[in-house]
Amino acid sequence: LTLYLGKRDYVDHISKVETVDGVVKLDPADFGDRKVFVQLACAFRYGSEDLDVMGLCFRKDIWIHQVQIYPDGTKP
């Protein structure tokens, strides 16, 4: 299973969020009858990244979205 995203950072413009572009490559033989989900988490990051190593958290999760991508016809 491989996930390719068009870019790492997406901008929230308050009225809309940039579309997340990406490709998931998977071999159905590896998954059989199991379901595969993609889960995206939108996080607001602030402060300096070098402070993260000191155990200080400068990230706030805003939303998490989950989508079933395999098998194709049974999306929630």
Image (cartoon, rainbow, N blue to C red):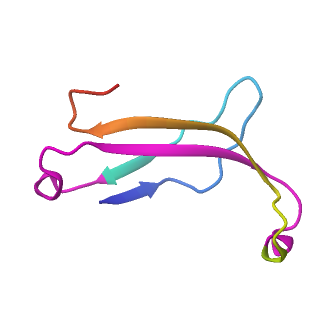
Name the residue located 83 percent from the left edge and 58 percent from the top edge: 58
Residue 45 or residue 61, whichever sits in front: 61
Camera-nearest residue between 18 and 34: 34
User: Above or below — where is 14 with respect to 27?
Assistant: above
Q: Which residues are magenta?
A: 25-52
Give the residue displayed 81% in from the left and 61% down from the top.
57
Residue depicted at 65% across the width and 53% down the height: 9
Left of 31 or right of it: where is 16? right
Reply above or below: 24 against 20.
below
Q: Can residue 67 be found in the magenta stretch?
A: no
Which image quadrant is residue 50 in?
A: bottom right
- Which residue occupies the extreme right position in the image? 47
Q: What residue is shown at x 48% (from left), y 54% (from top)?
A: 5
Left or right of 30 on screen, residue 68: right
Q: Give residue 41's position: percent from left, percent from top.
A: 59, 45
Give the tally of numbered discs.
0
Indicate left or right for 35 with 3 as reference.
Answer: left
- The quadrant of the image that shows the N terminus is bottom left
Between 38 and 34, the residue placed more toward the observer is 34
Q: Is residue 30 left or right of residue 74?
A: left
Query: How far from the left and from the top, in percent, is residue 74?
Result: 24, 27
Q: Residue 14's x, y, as percent?
A: 77, 28
Q: Is residue 27 magenta?
A: yes
Residue 44 is situated, as x and y percent measured from the top left of the image, at: 76, 47
Query: Hey, which quadrant is residue 62 in on the image?
Result: top right
Q: Quadrant of the C terminus?
A: top left
